[in-house]
Image (cartoon, grey):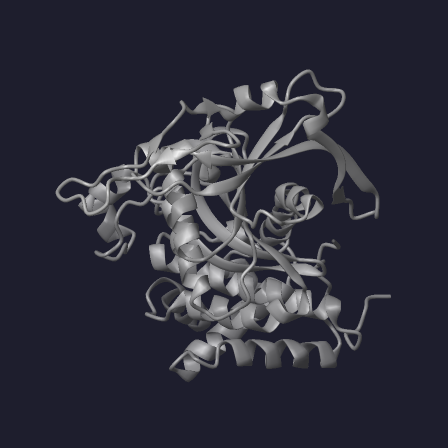
Amino acid sequence: MQEASVVEITAADARERLVAFVSEVVAGLPHVRQRENALLYVRGLVEQGGRKSLWPTLFRLGEDAARYESLQQFLADSPWEPSALVRAAAERVYPKIGVTAWVVDDTGIPKDGTHSPGVKRQYSGTLGKIGNCQVTVSLHAVGKRGTVPLGWALYLPEEWCRDRSRRLKAKIPPEVAFKTKPELAAALAEQVALWGLPSAPVLADSAYGDDTDFRTCLEDLGLSYVVAISPKTSVFGPGASFLPPPPGSRGRPRRFEPHEAPQSVGSLAAELPSAAFQTLPCRTTPAGEVQMSRFALVRVVAAHPVMRDWLAPRSEWLIVEWPEEEEAPTDFWLSNLPAEEEPERLVRLARLRWSIELDYRQLKGELGLDHYEGRSYLGFHHHCALVTCAHAFLTLERLSPKAQRPA
């Protein structure tokens, strides 16, 4: 999959396409000045190099202090719904990219000080360590011809949610309560599921896949998933049987009783015969190279929903990767895709999540996702929505045969 690149837009027809696209996306904003500010902001993200924070961008565009004040208010305080812009941008890109999956992930945004909403010393996969940063959870559609963000949610640690003074200063709405990252991701998936776009399997790493409530929420939404899990995750192996609750029982709910004890997926994988593993194509690199690895695919029942949540047993795929050169299995996934699903599709989906890094690279390094310097909770989400609009335009430019290419 090619990464969309930011081109220097100088041709008149390219500028006209940008204006037309943004005008369509922001048409739902109720005020003319809001629509003007949105267009100007996206122009700054797309057309201008360097840091994409507000004042340097406006300076390069030749704007004055009055426009700066107007844009500050538009970002930080204006009560427009950022998800509406994300949806409008996604609806224009989604049909063009051949969507194969939705990918959940989060990214850290390094910050100085303590005033930006959600900032604290916390682990960031982006930094690869604990650092002073914000963390935003995001959902992206990944396709054969590109990607498009579908939603953003800033993670607010519990101490932020409890601190009334900090909430007021960061303009965090009263209805915003603490949610874990998997809860934020599930809420994004639920929101996008209502848009009417064709759904695709949800992919996520083990920080989300290990969360039983997250998997159950996706199942309840009618969404399929292929999510990484840790080796300690407990399952009932192939052929497991359960005694159903007595019919017509009253009072406290009764759970399905298993006829055997669960075991970790790590121990189950170690017991699989070598014949259970097959070599399958699992990834095609941007250069067209097909990568192969060894996988076992086994039908299992996750233990936690049955034993702790008292839900009915649900048969799922356990995908185990055990490369030839390794002494033990390296990766594990659970999937609720149908029992008749093709093995190659399962393992390709399992290994597809890496592509989200290309999105973050462009969104941050080229479009300024991590350049917002305001201290407003709503402003952060407004910024993410406008970055999404810029990303969507560039994706369509790359796909359009009429778009002017740099010499």
- Residue depicted at 47% across the width and 74% down the height: 37
Q: How many marks?
A: 0
In this view, the residue farthest toward the top is: 327
Residue 136 seen in this snapshot: yes
- Residue depicted at 45% across the width and 72% down the height: 67
In this view, the residue farthest toward the right is: 407
Can you tell which quarter of the image residue 353 is in? top right
Residue 113, how many percent across, how many down? 38, 38
Residue 380, how many percent across, how many down? 41, 56
Residue 253, how many percent across, how many down? 20, 41
In this view, the residue farthest toward the front is: 247
Query: Is residue 41 toward the left or the right of residue 12 in the image?
Result: left
Can you tell which quarter of the image residue 173 is in? bottom left
Query: Is residue 177 toward the left or the right of residue 343 in the image?
Result: left
Residue 340, how many percent across, how many down? 62, 49
Residue 121 seen in this snapshot: no
Q: Quadrant of the C terminus?
A: bottom right
Q: Out of 242 and 265, give the one closest to the viewer.
A: 242
**Position of 277 relative to 281 (above/below):** above
In this view, the residue farthest toward the bottom is: 32
Q: Out of 224 and 90, give the one closest to the viewer.
A: 224
- Residue depicted at 32% across the width and 70% down the height: 79
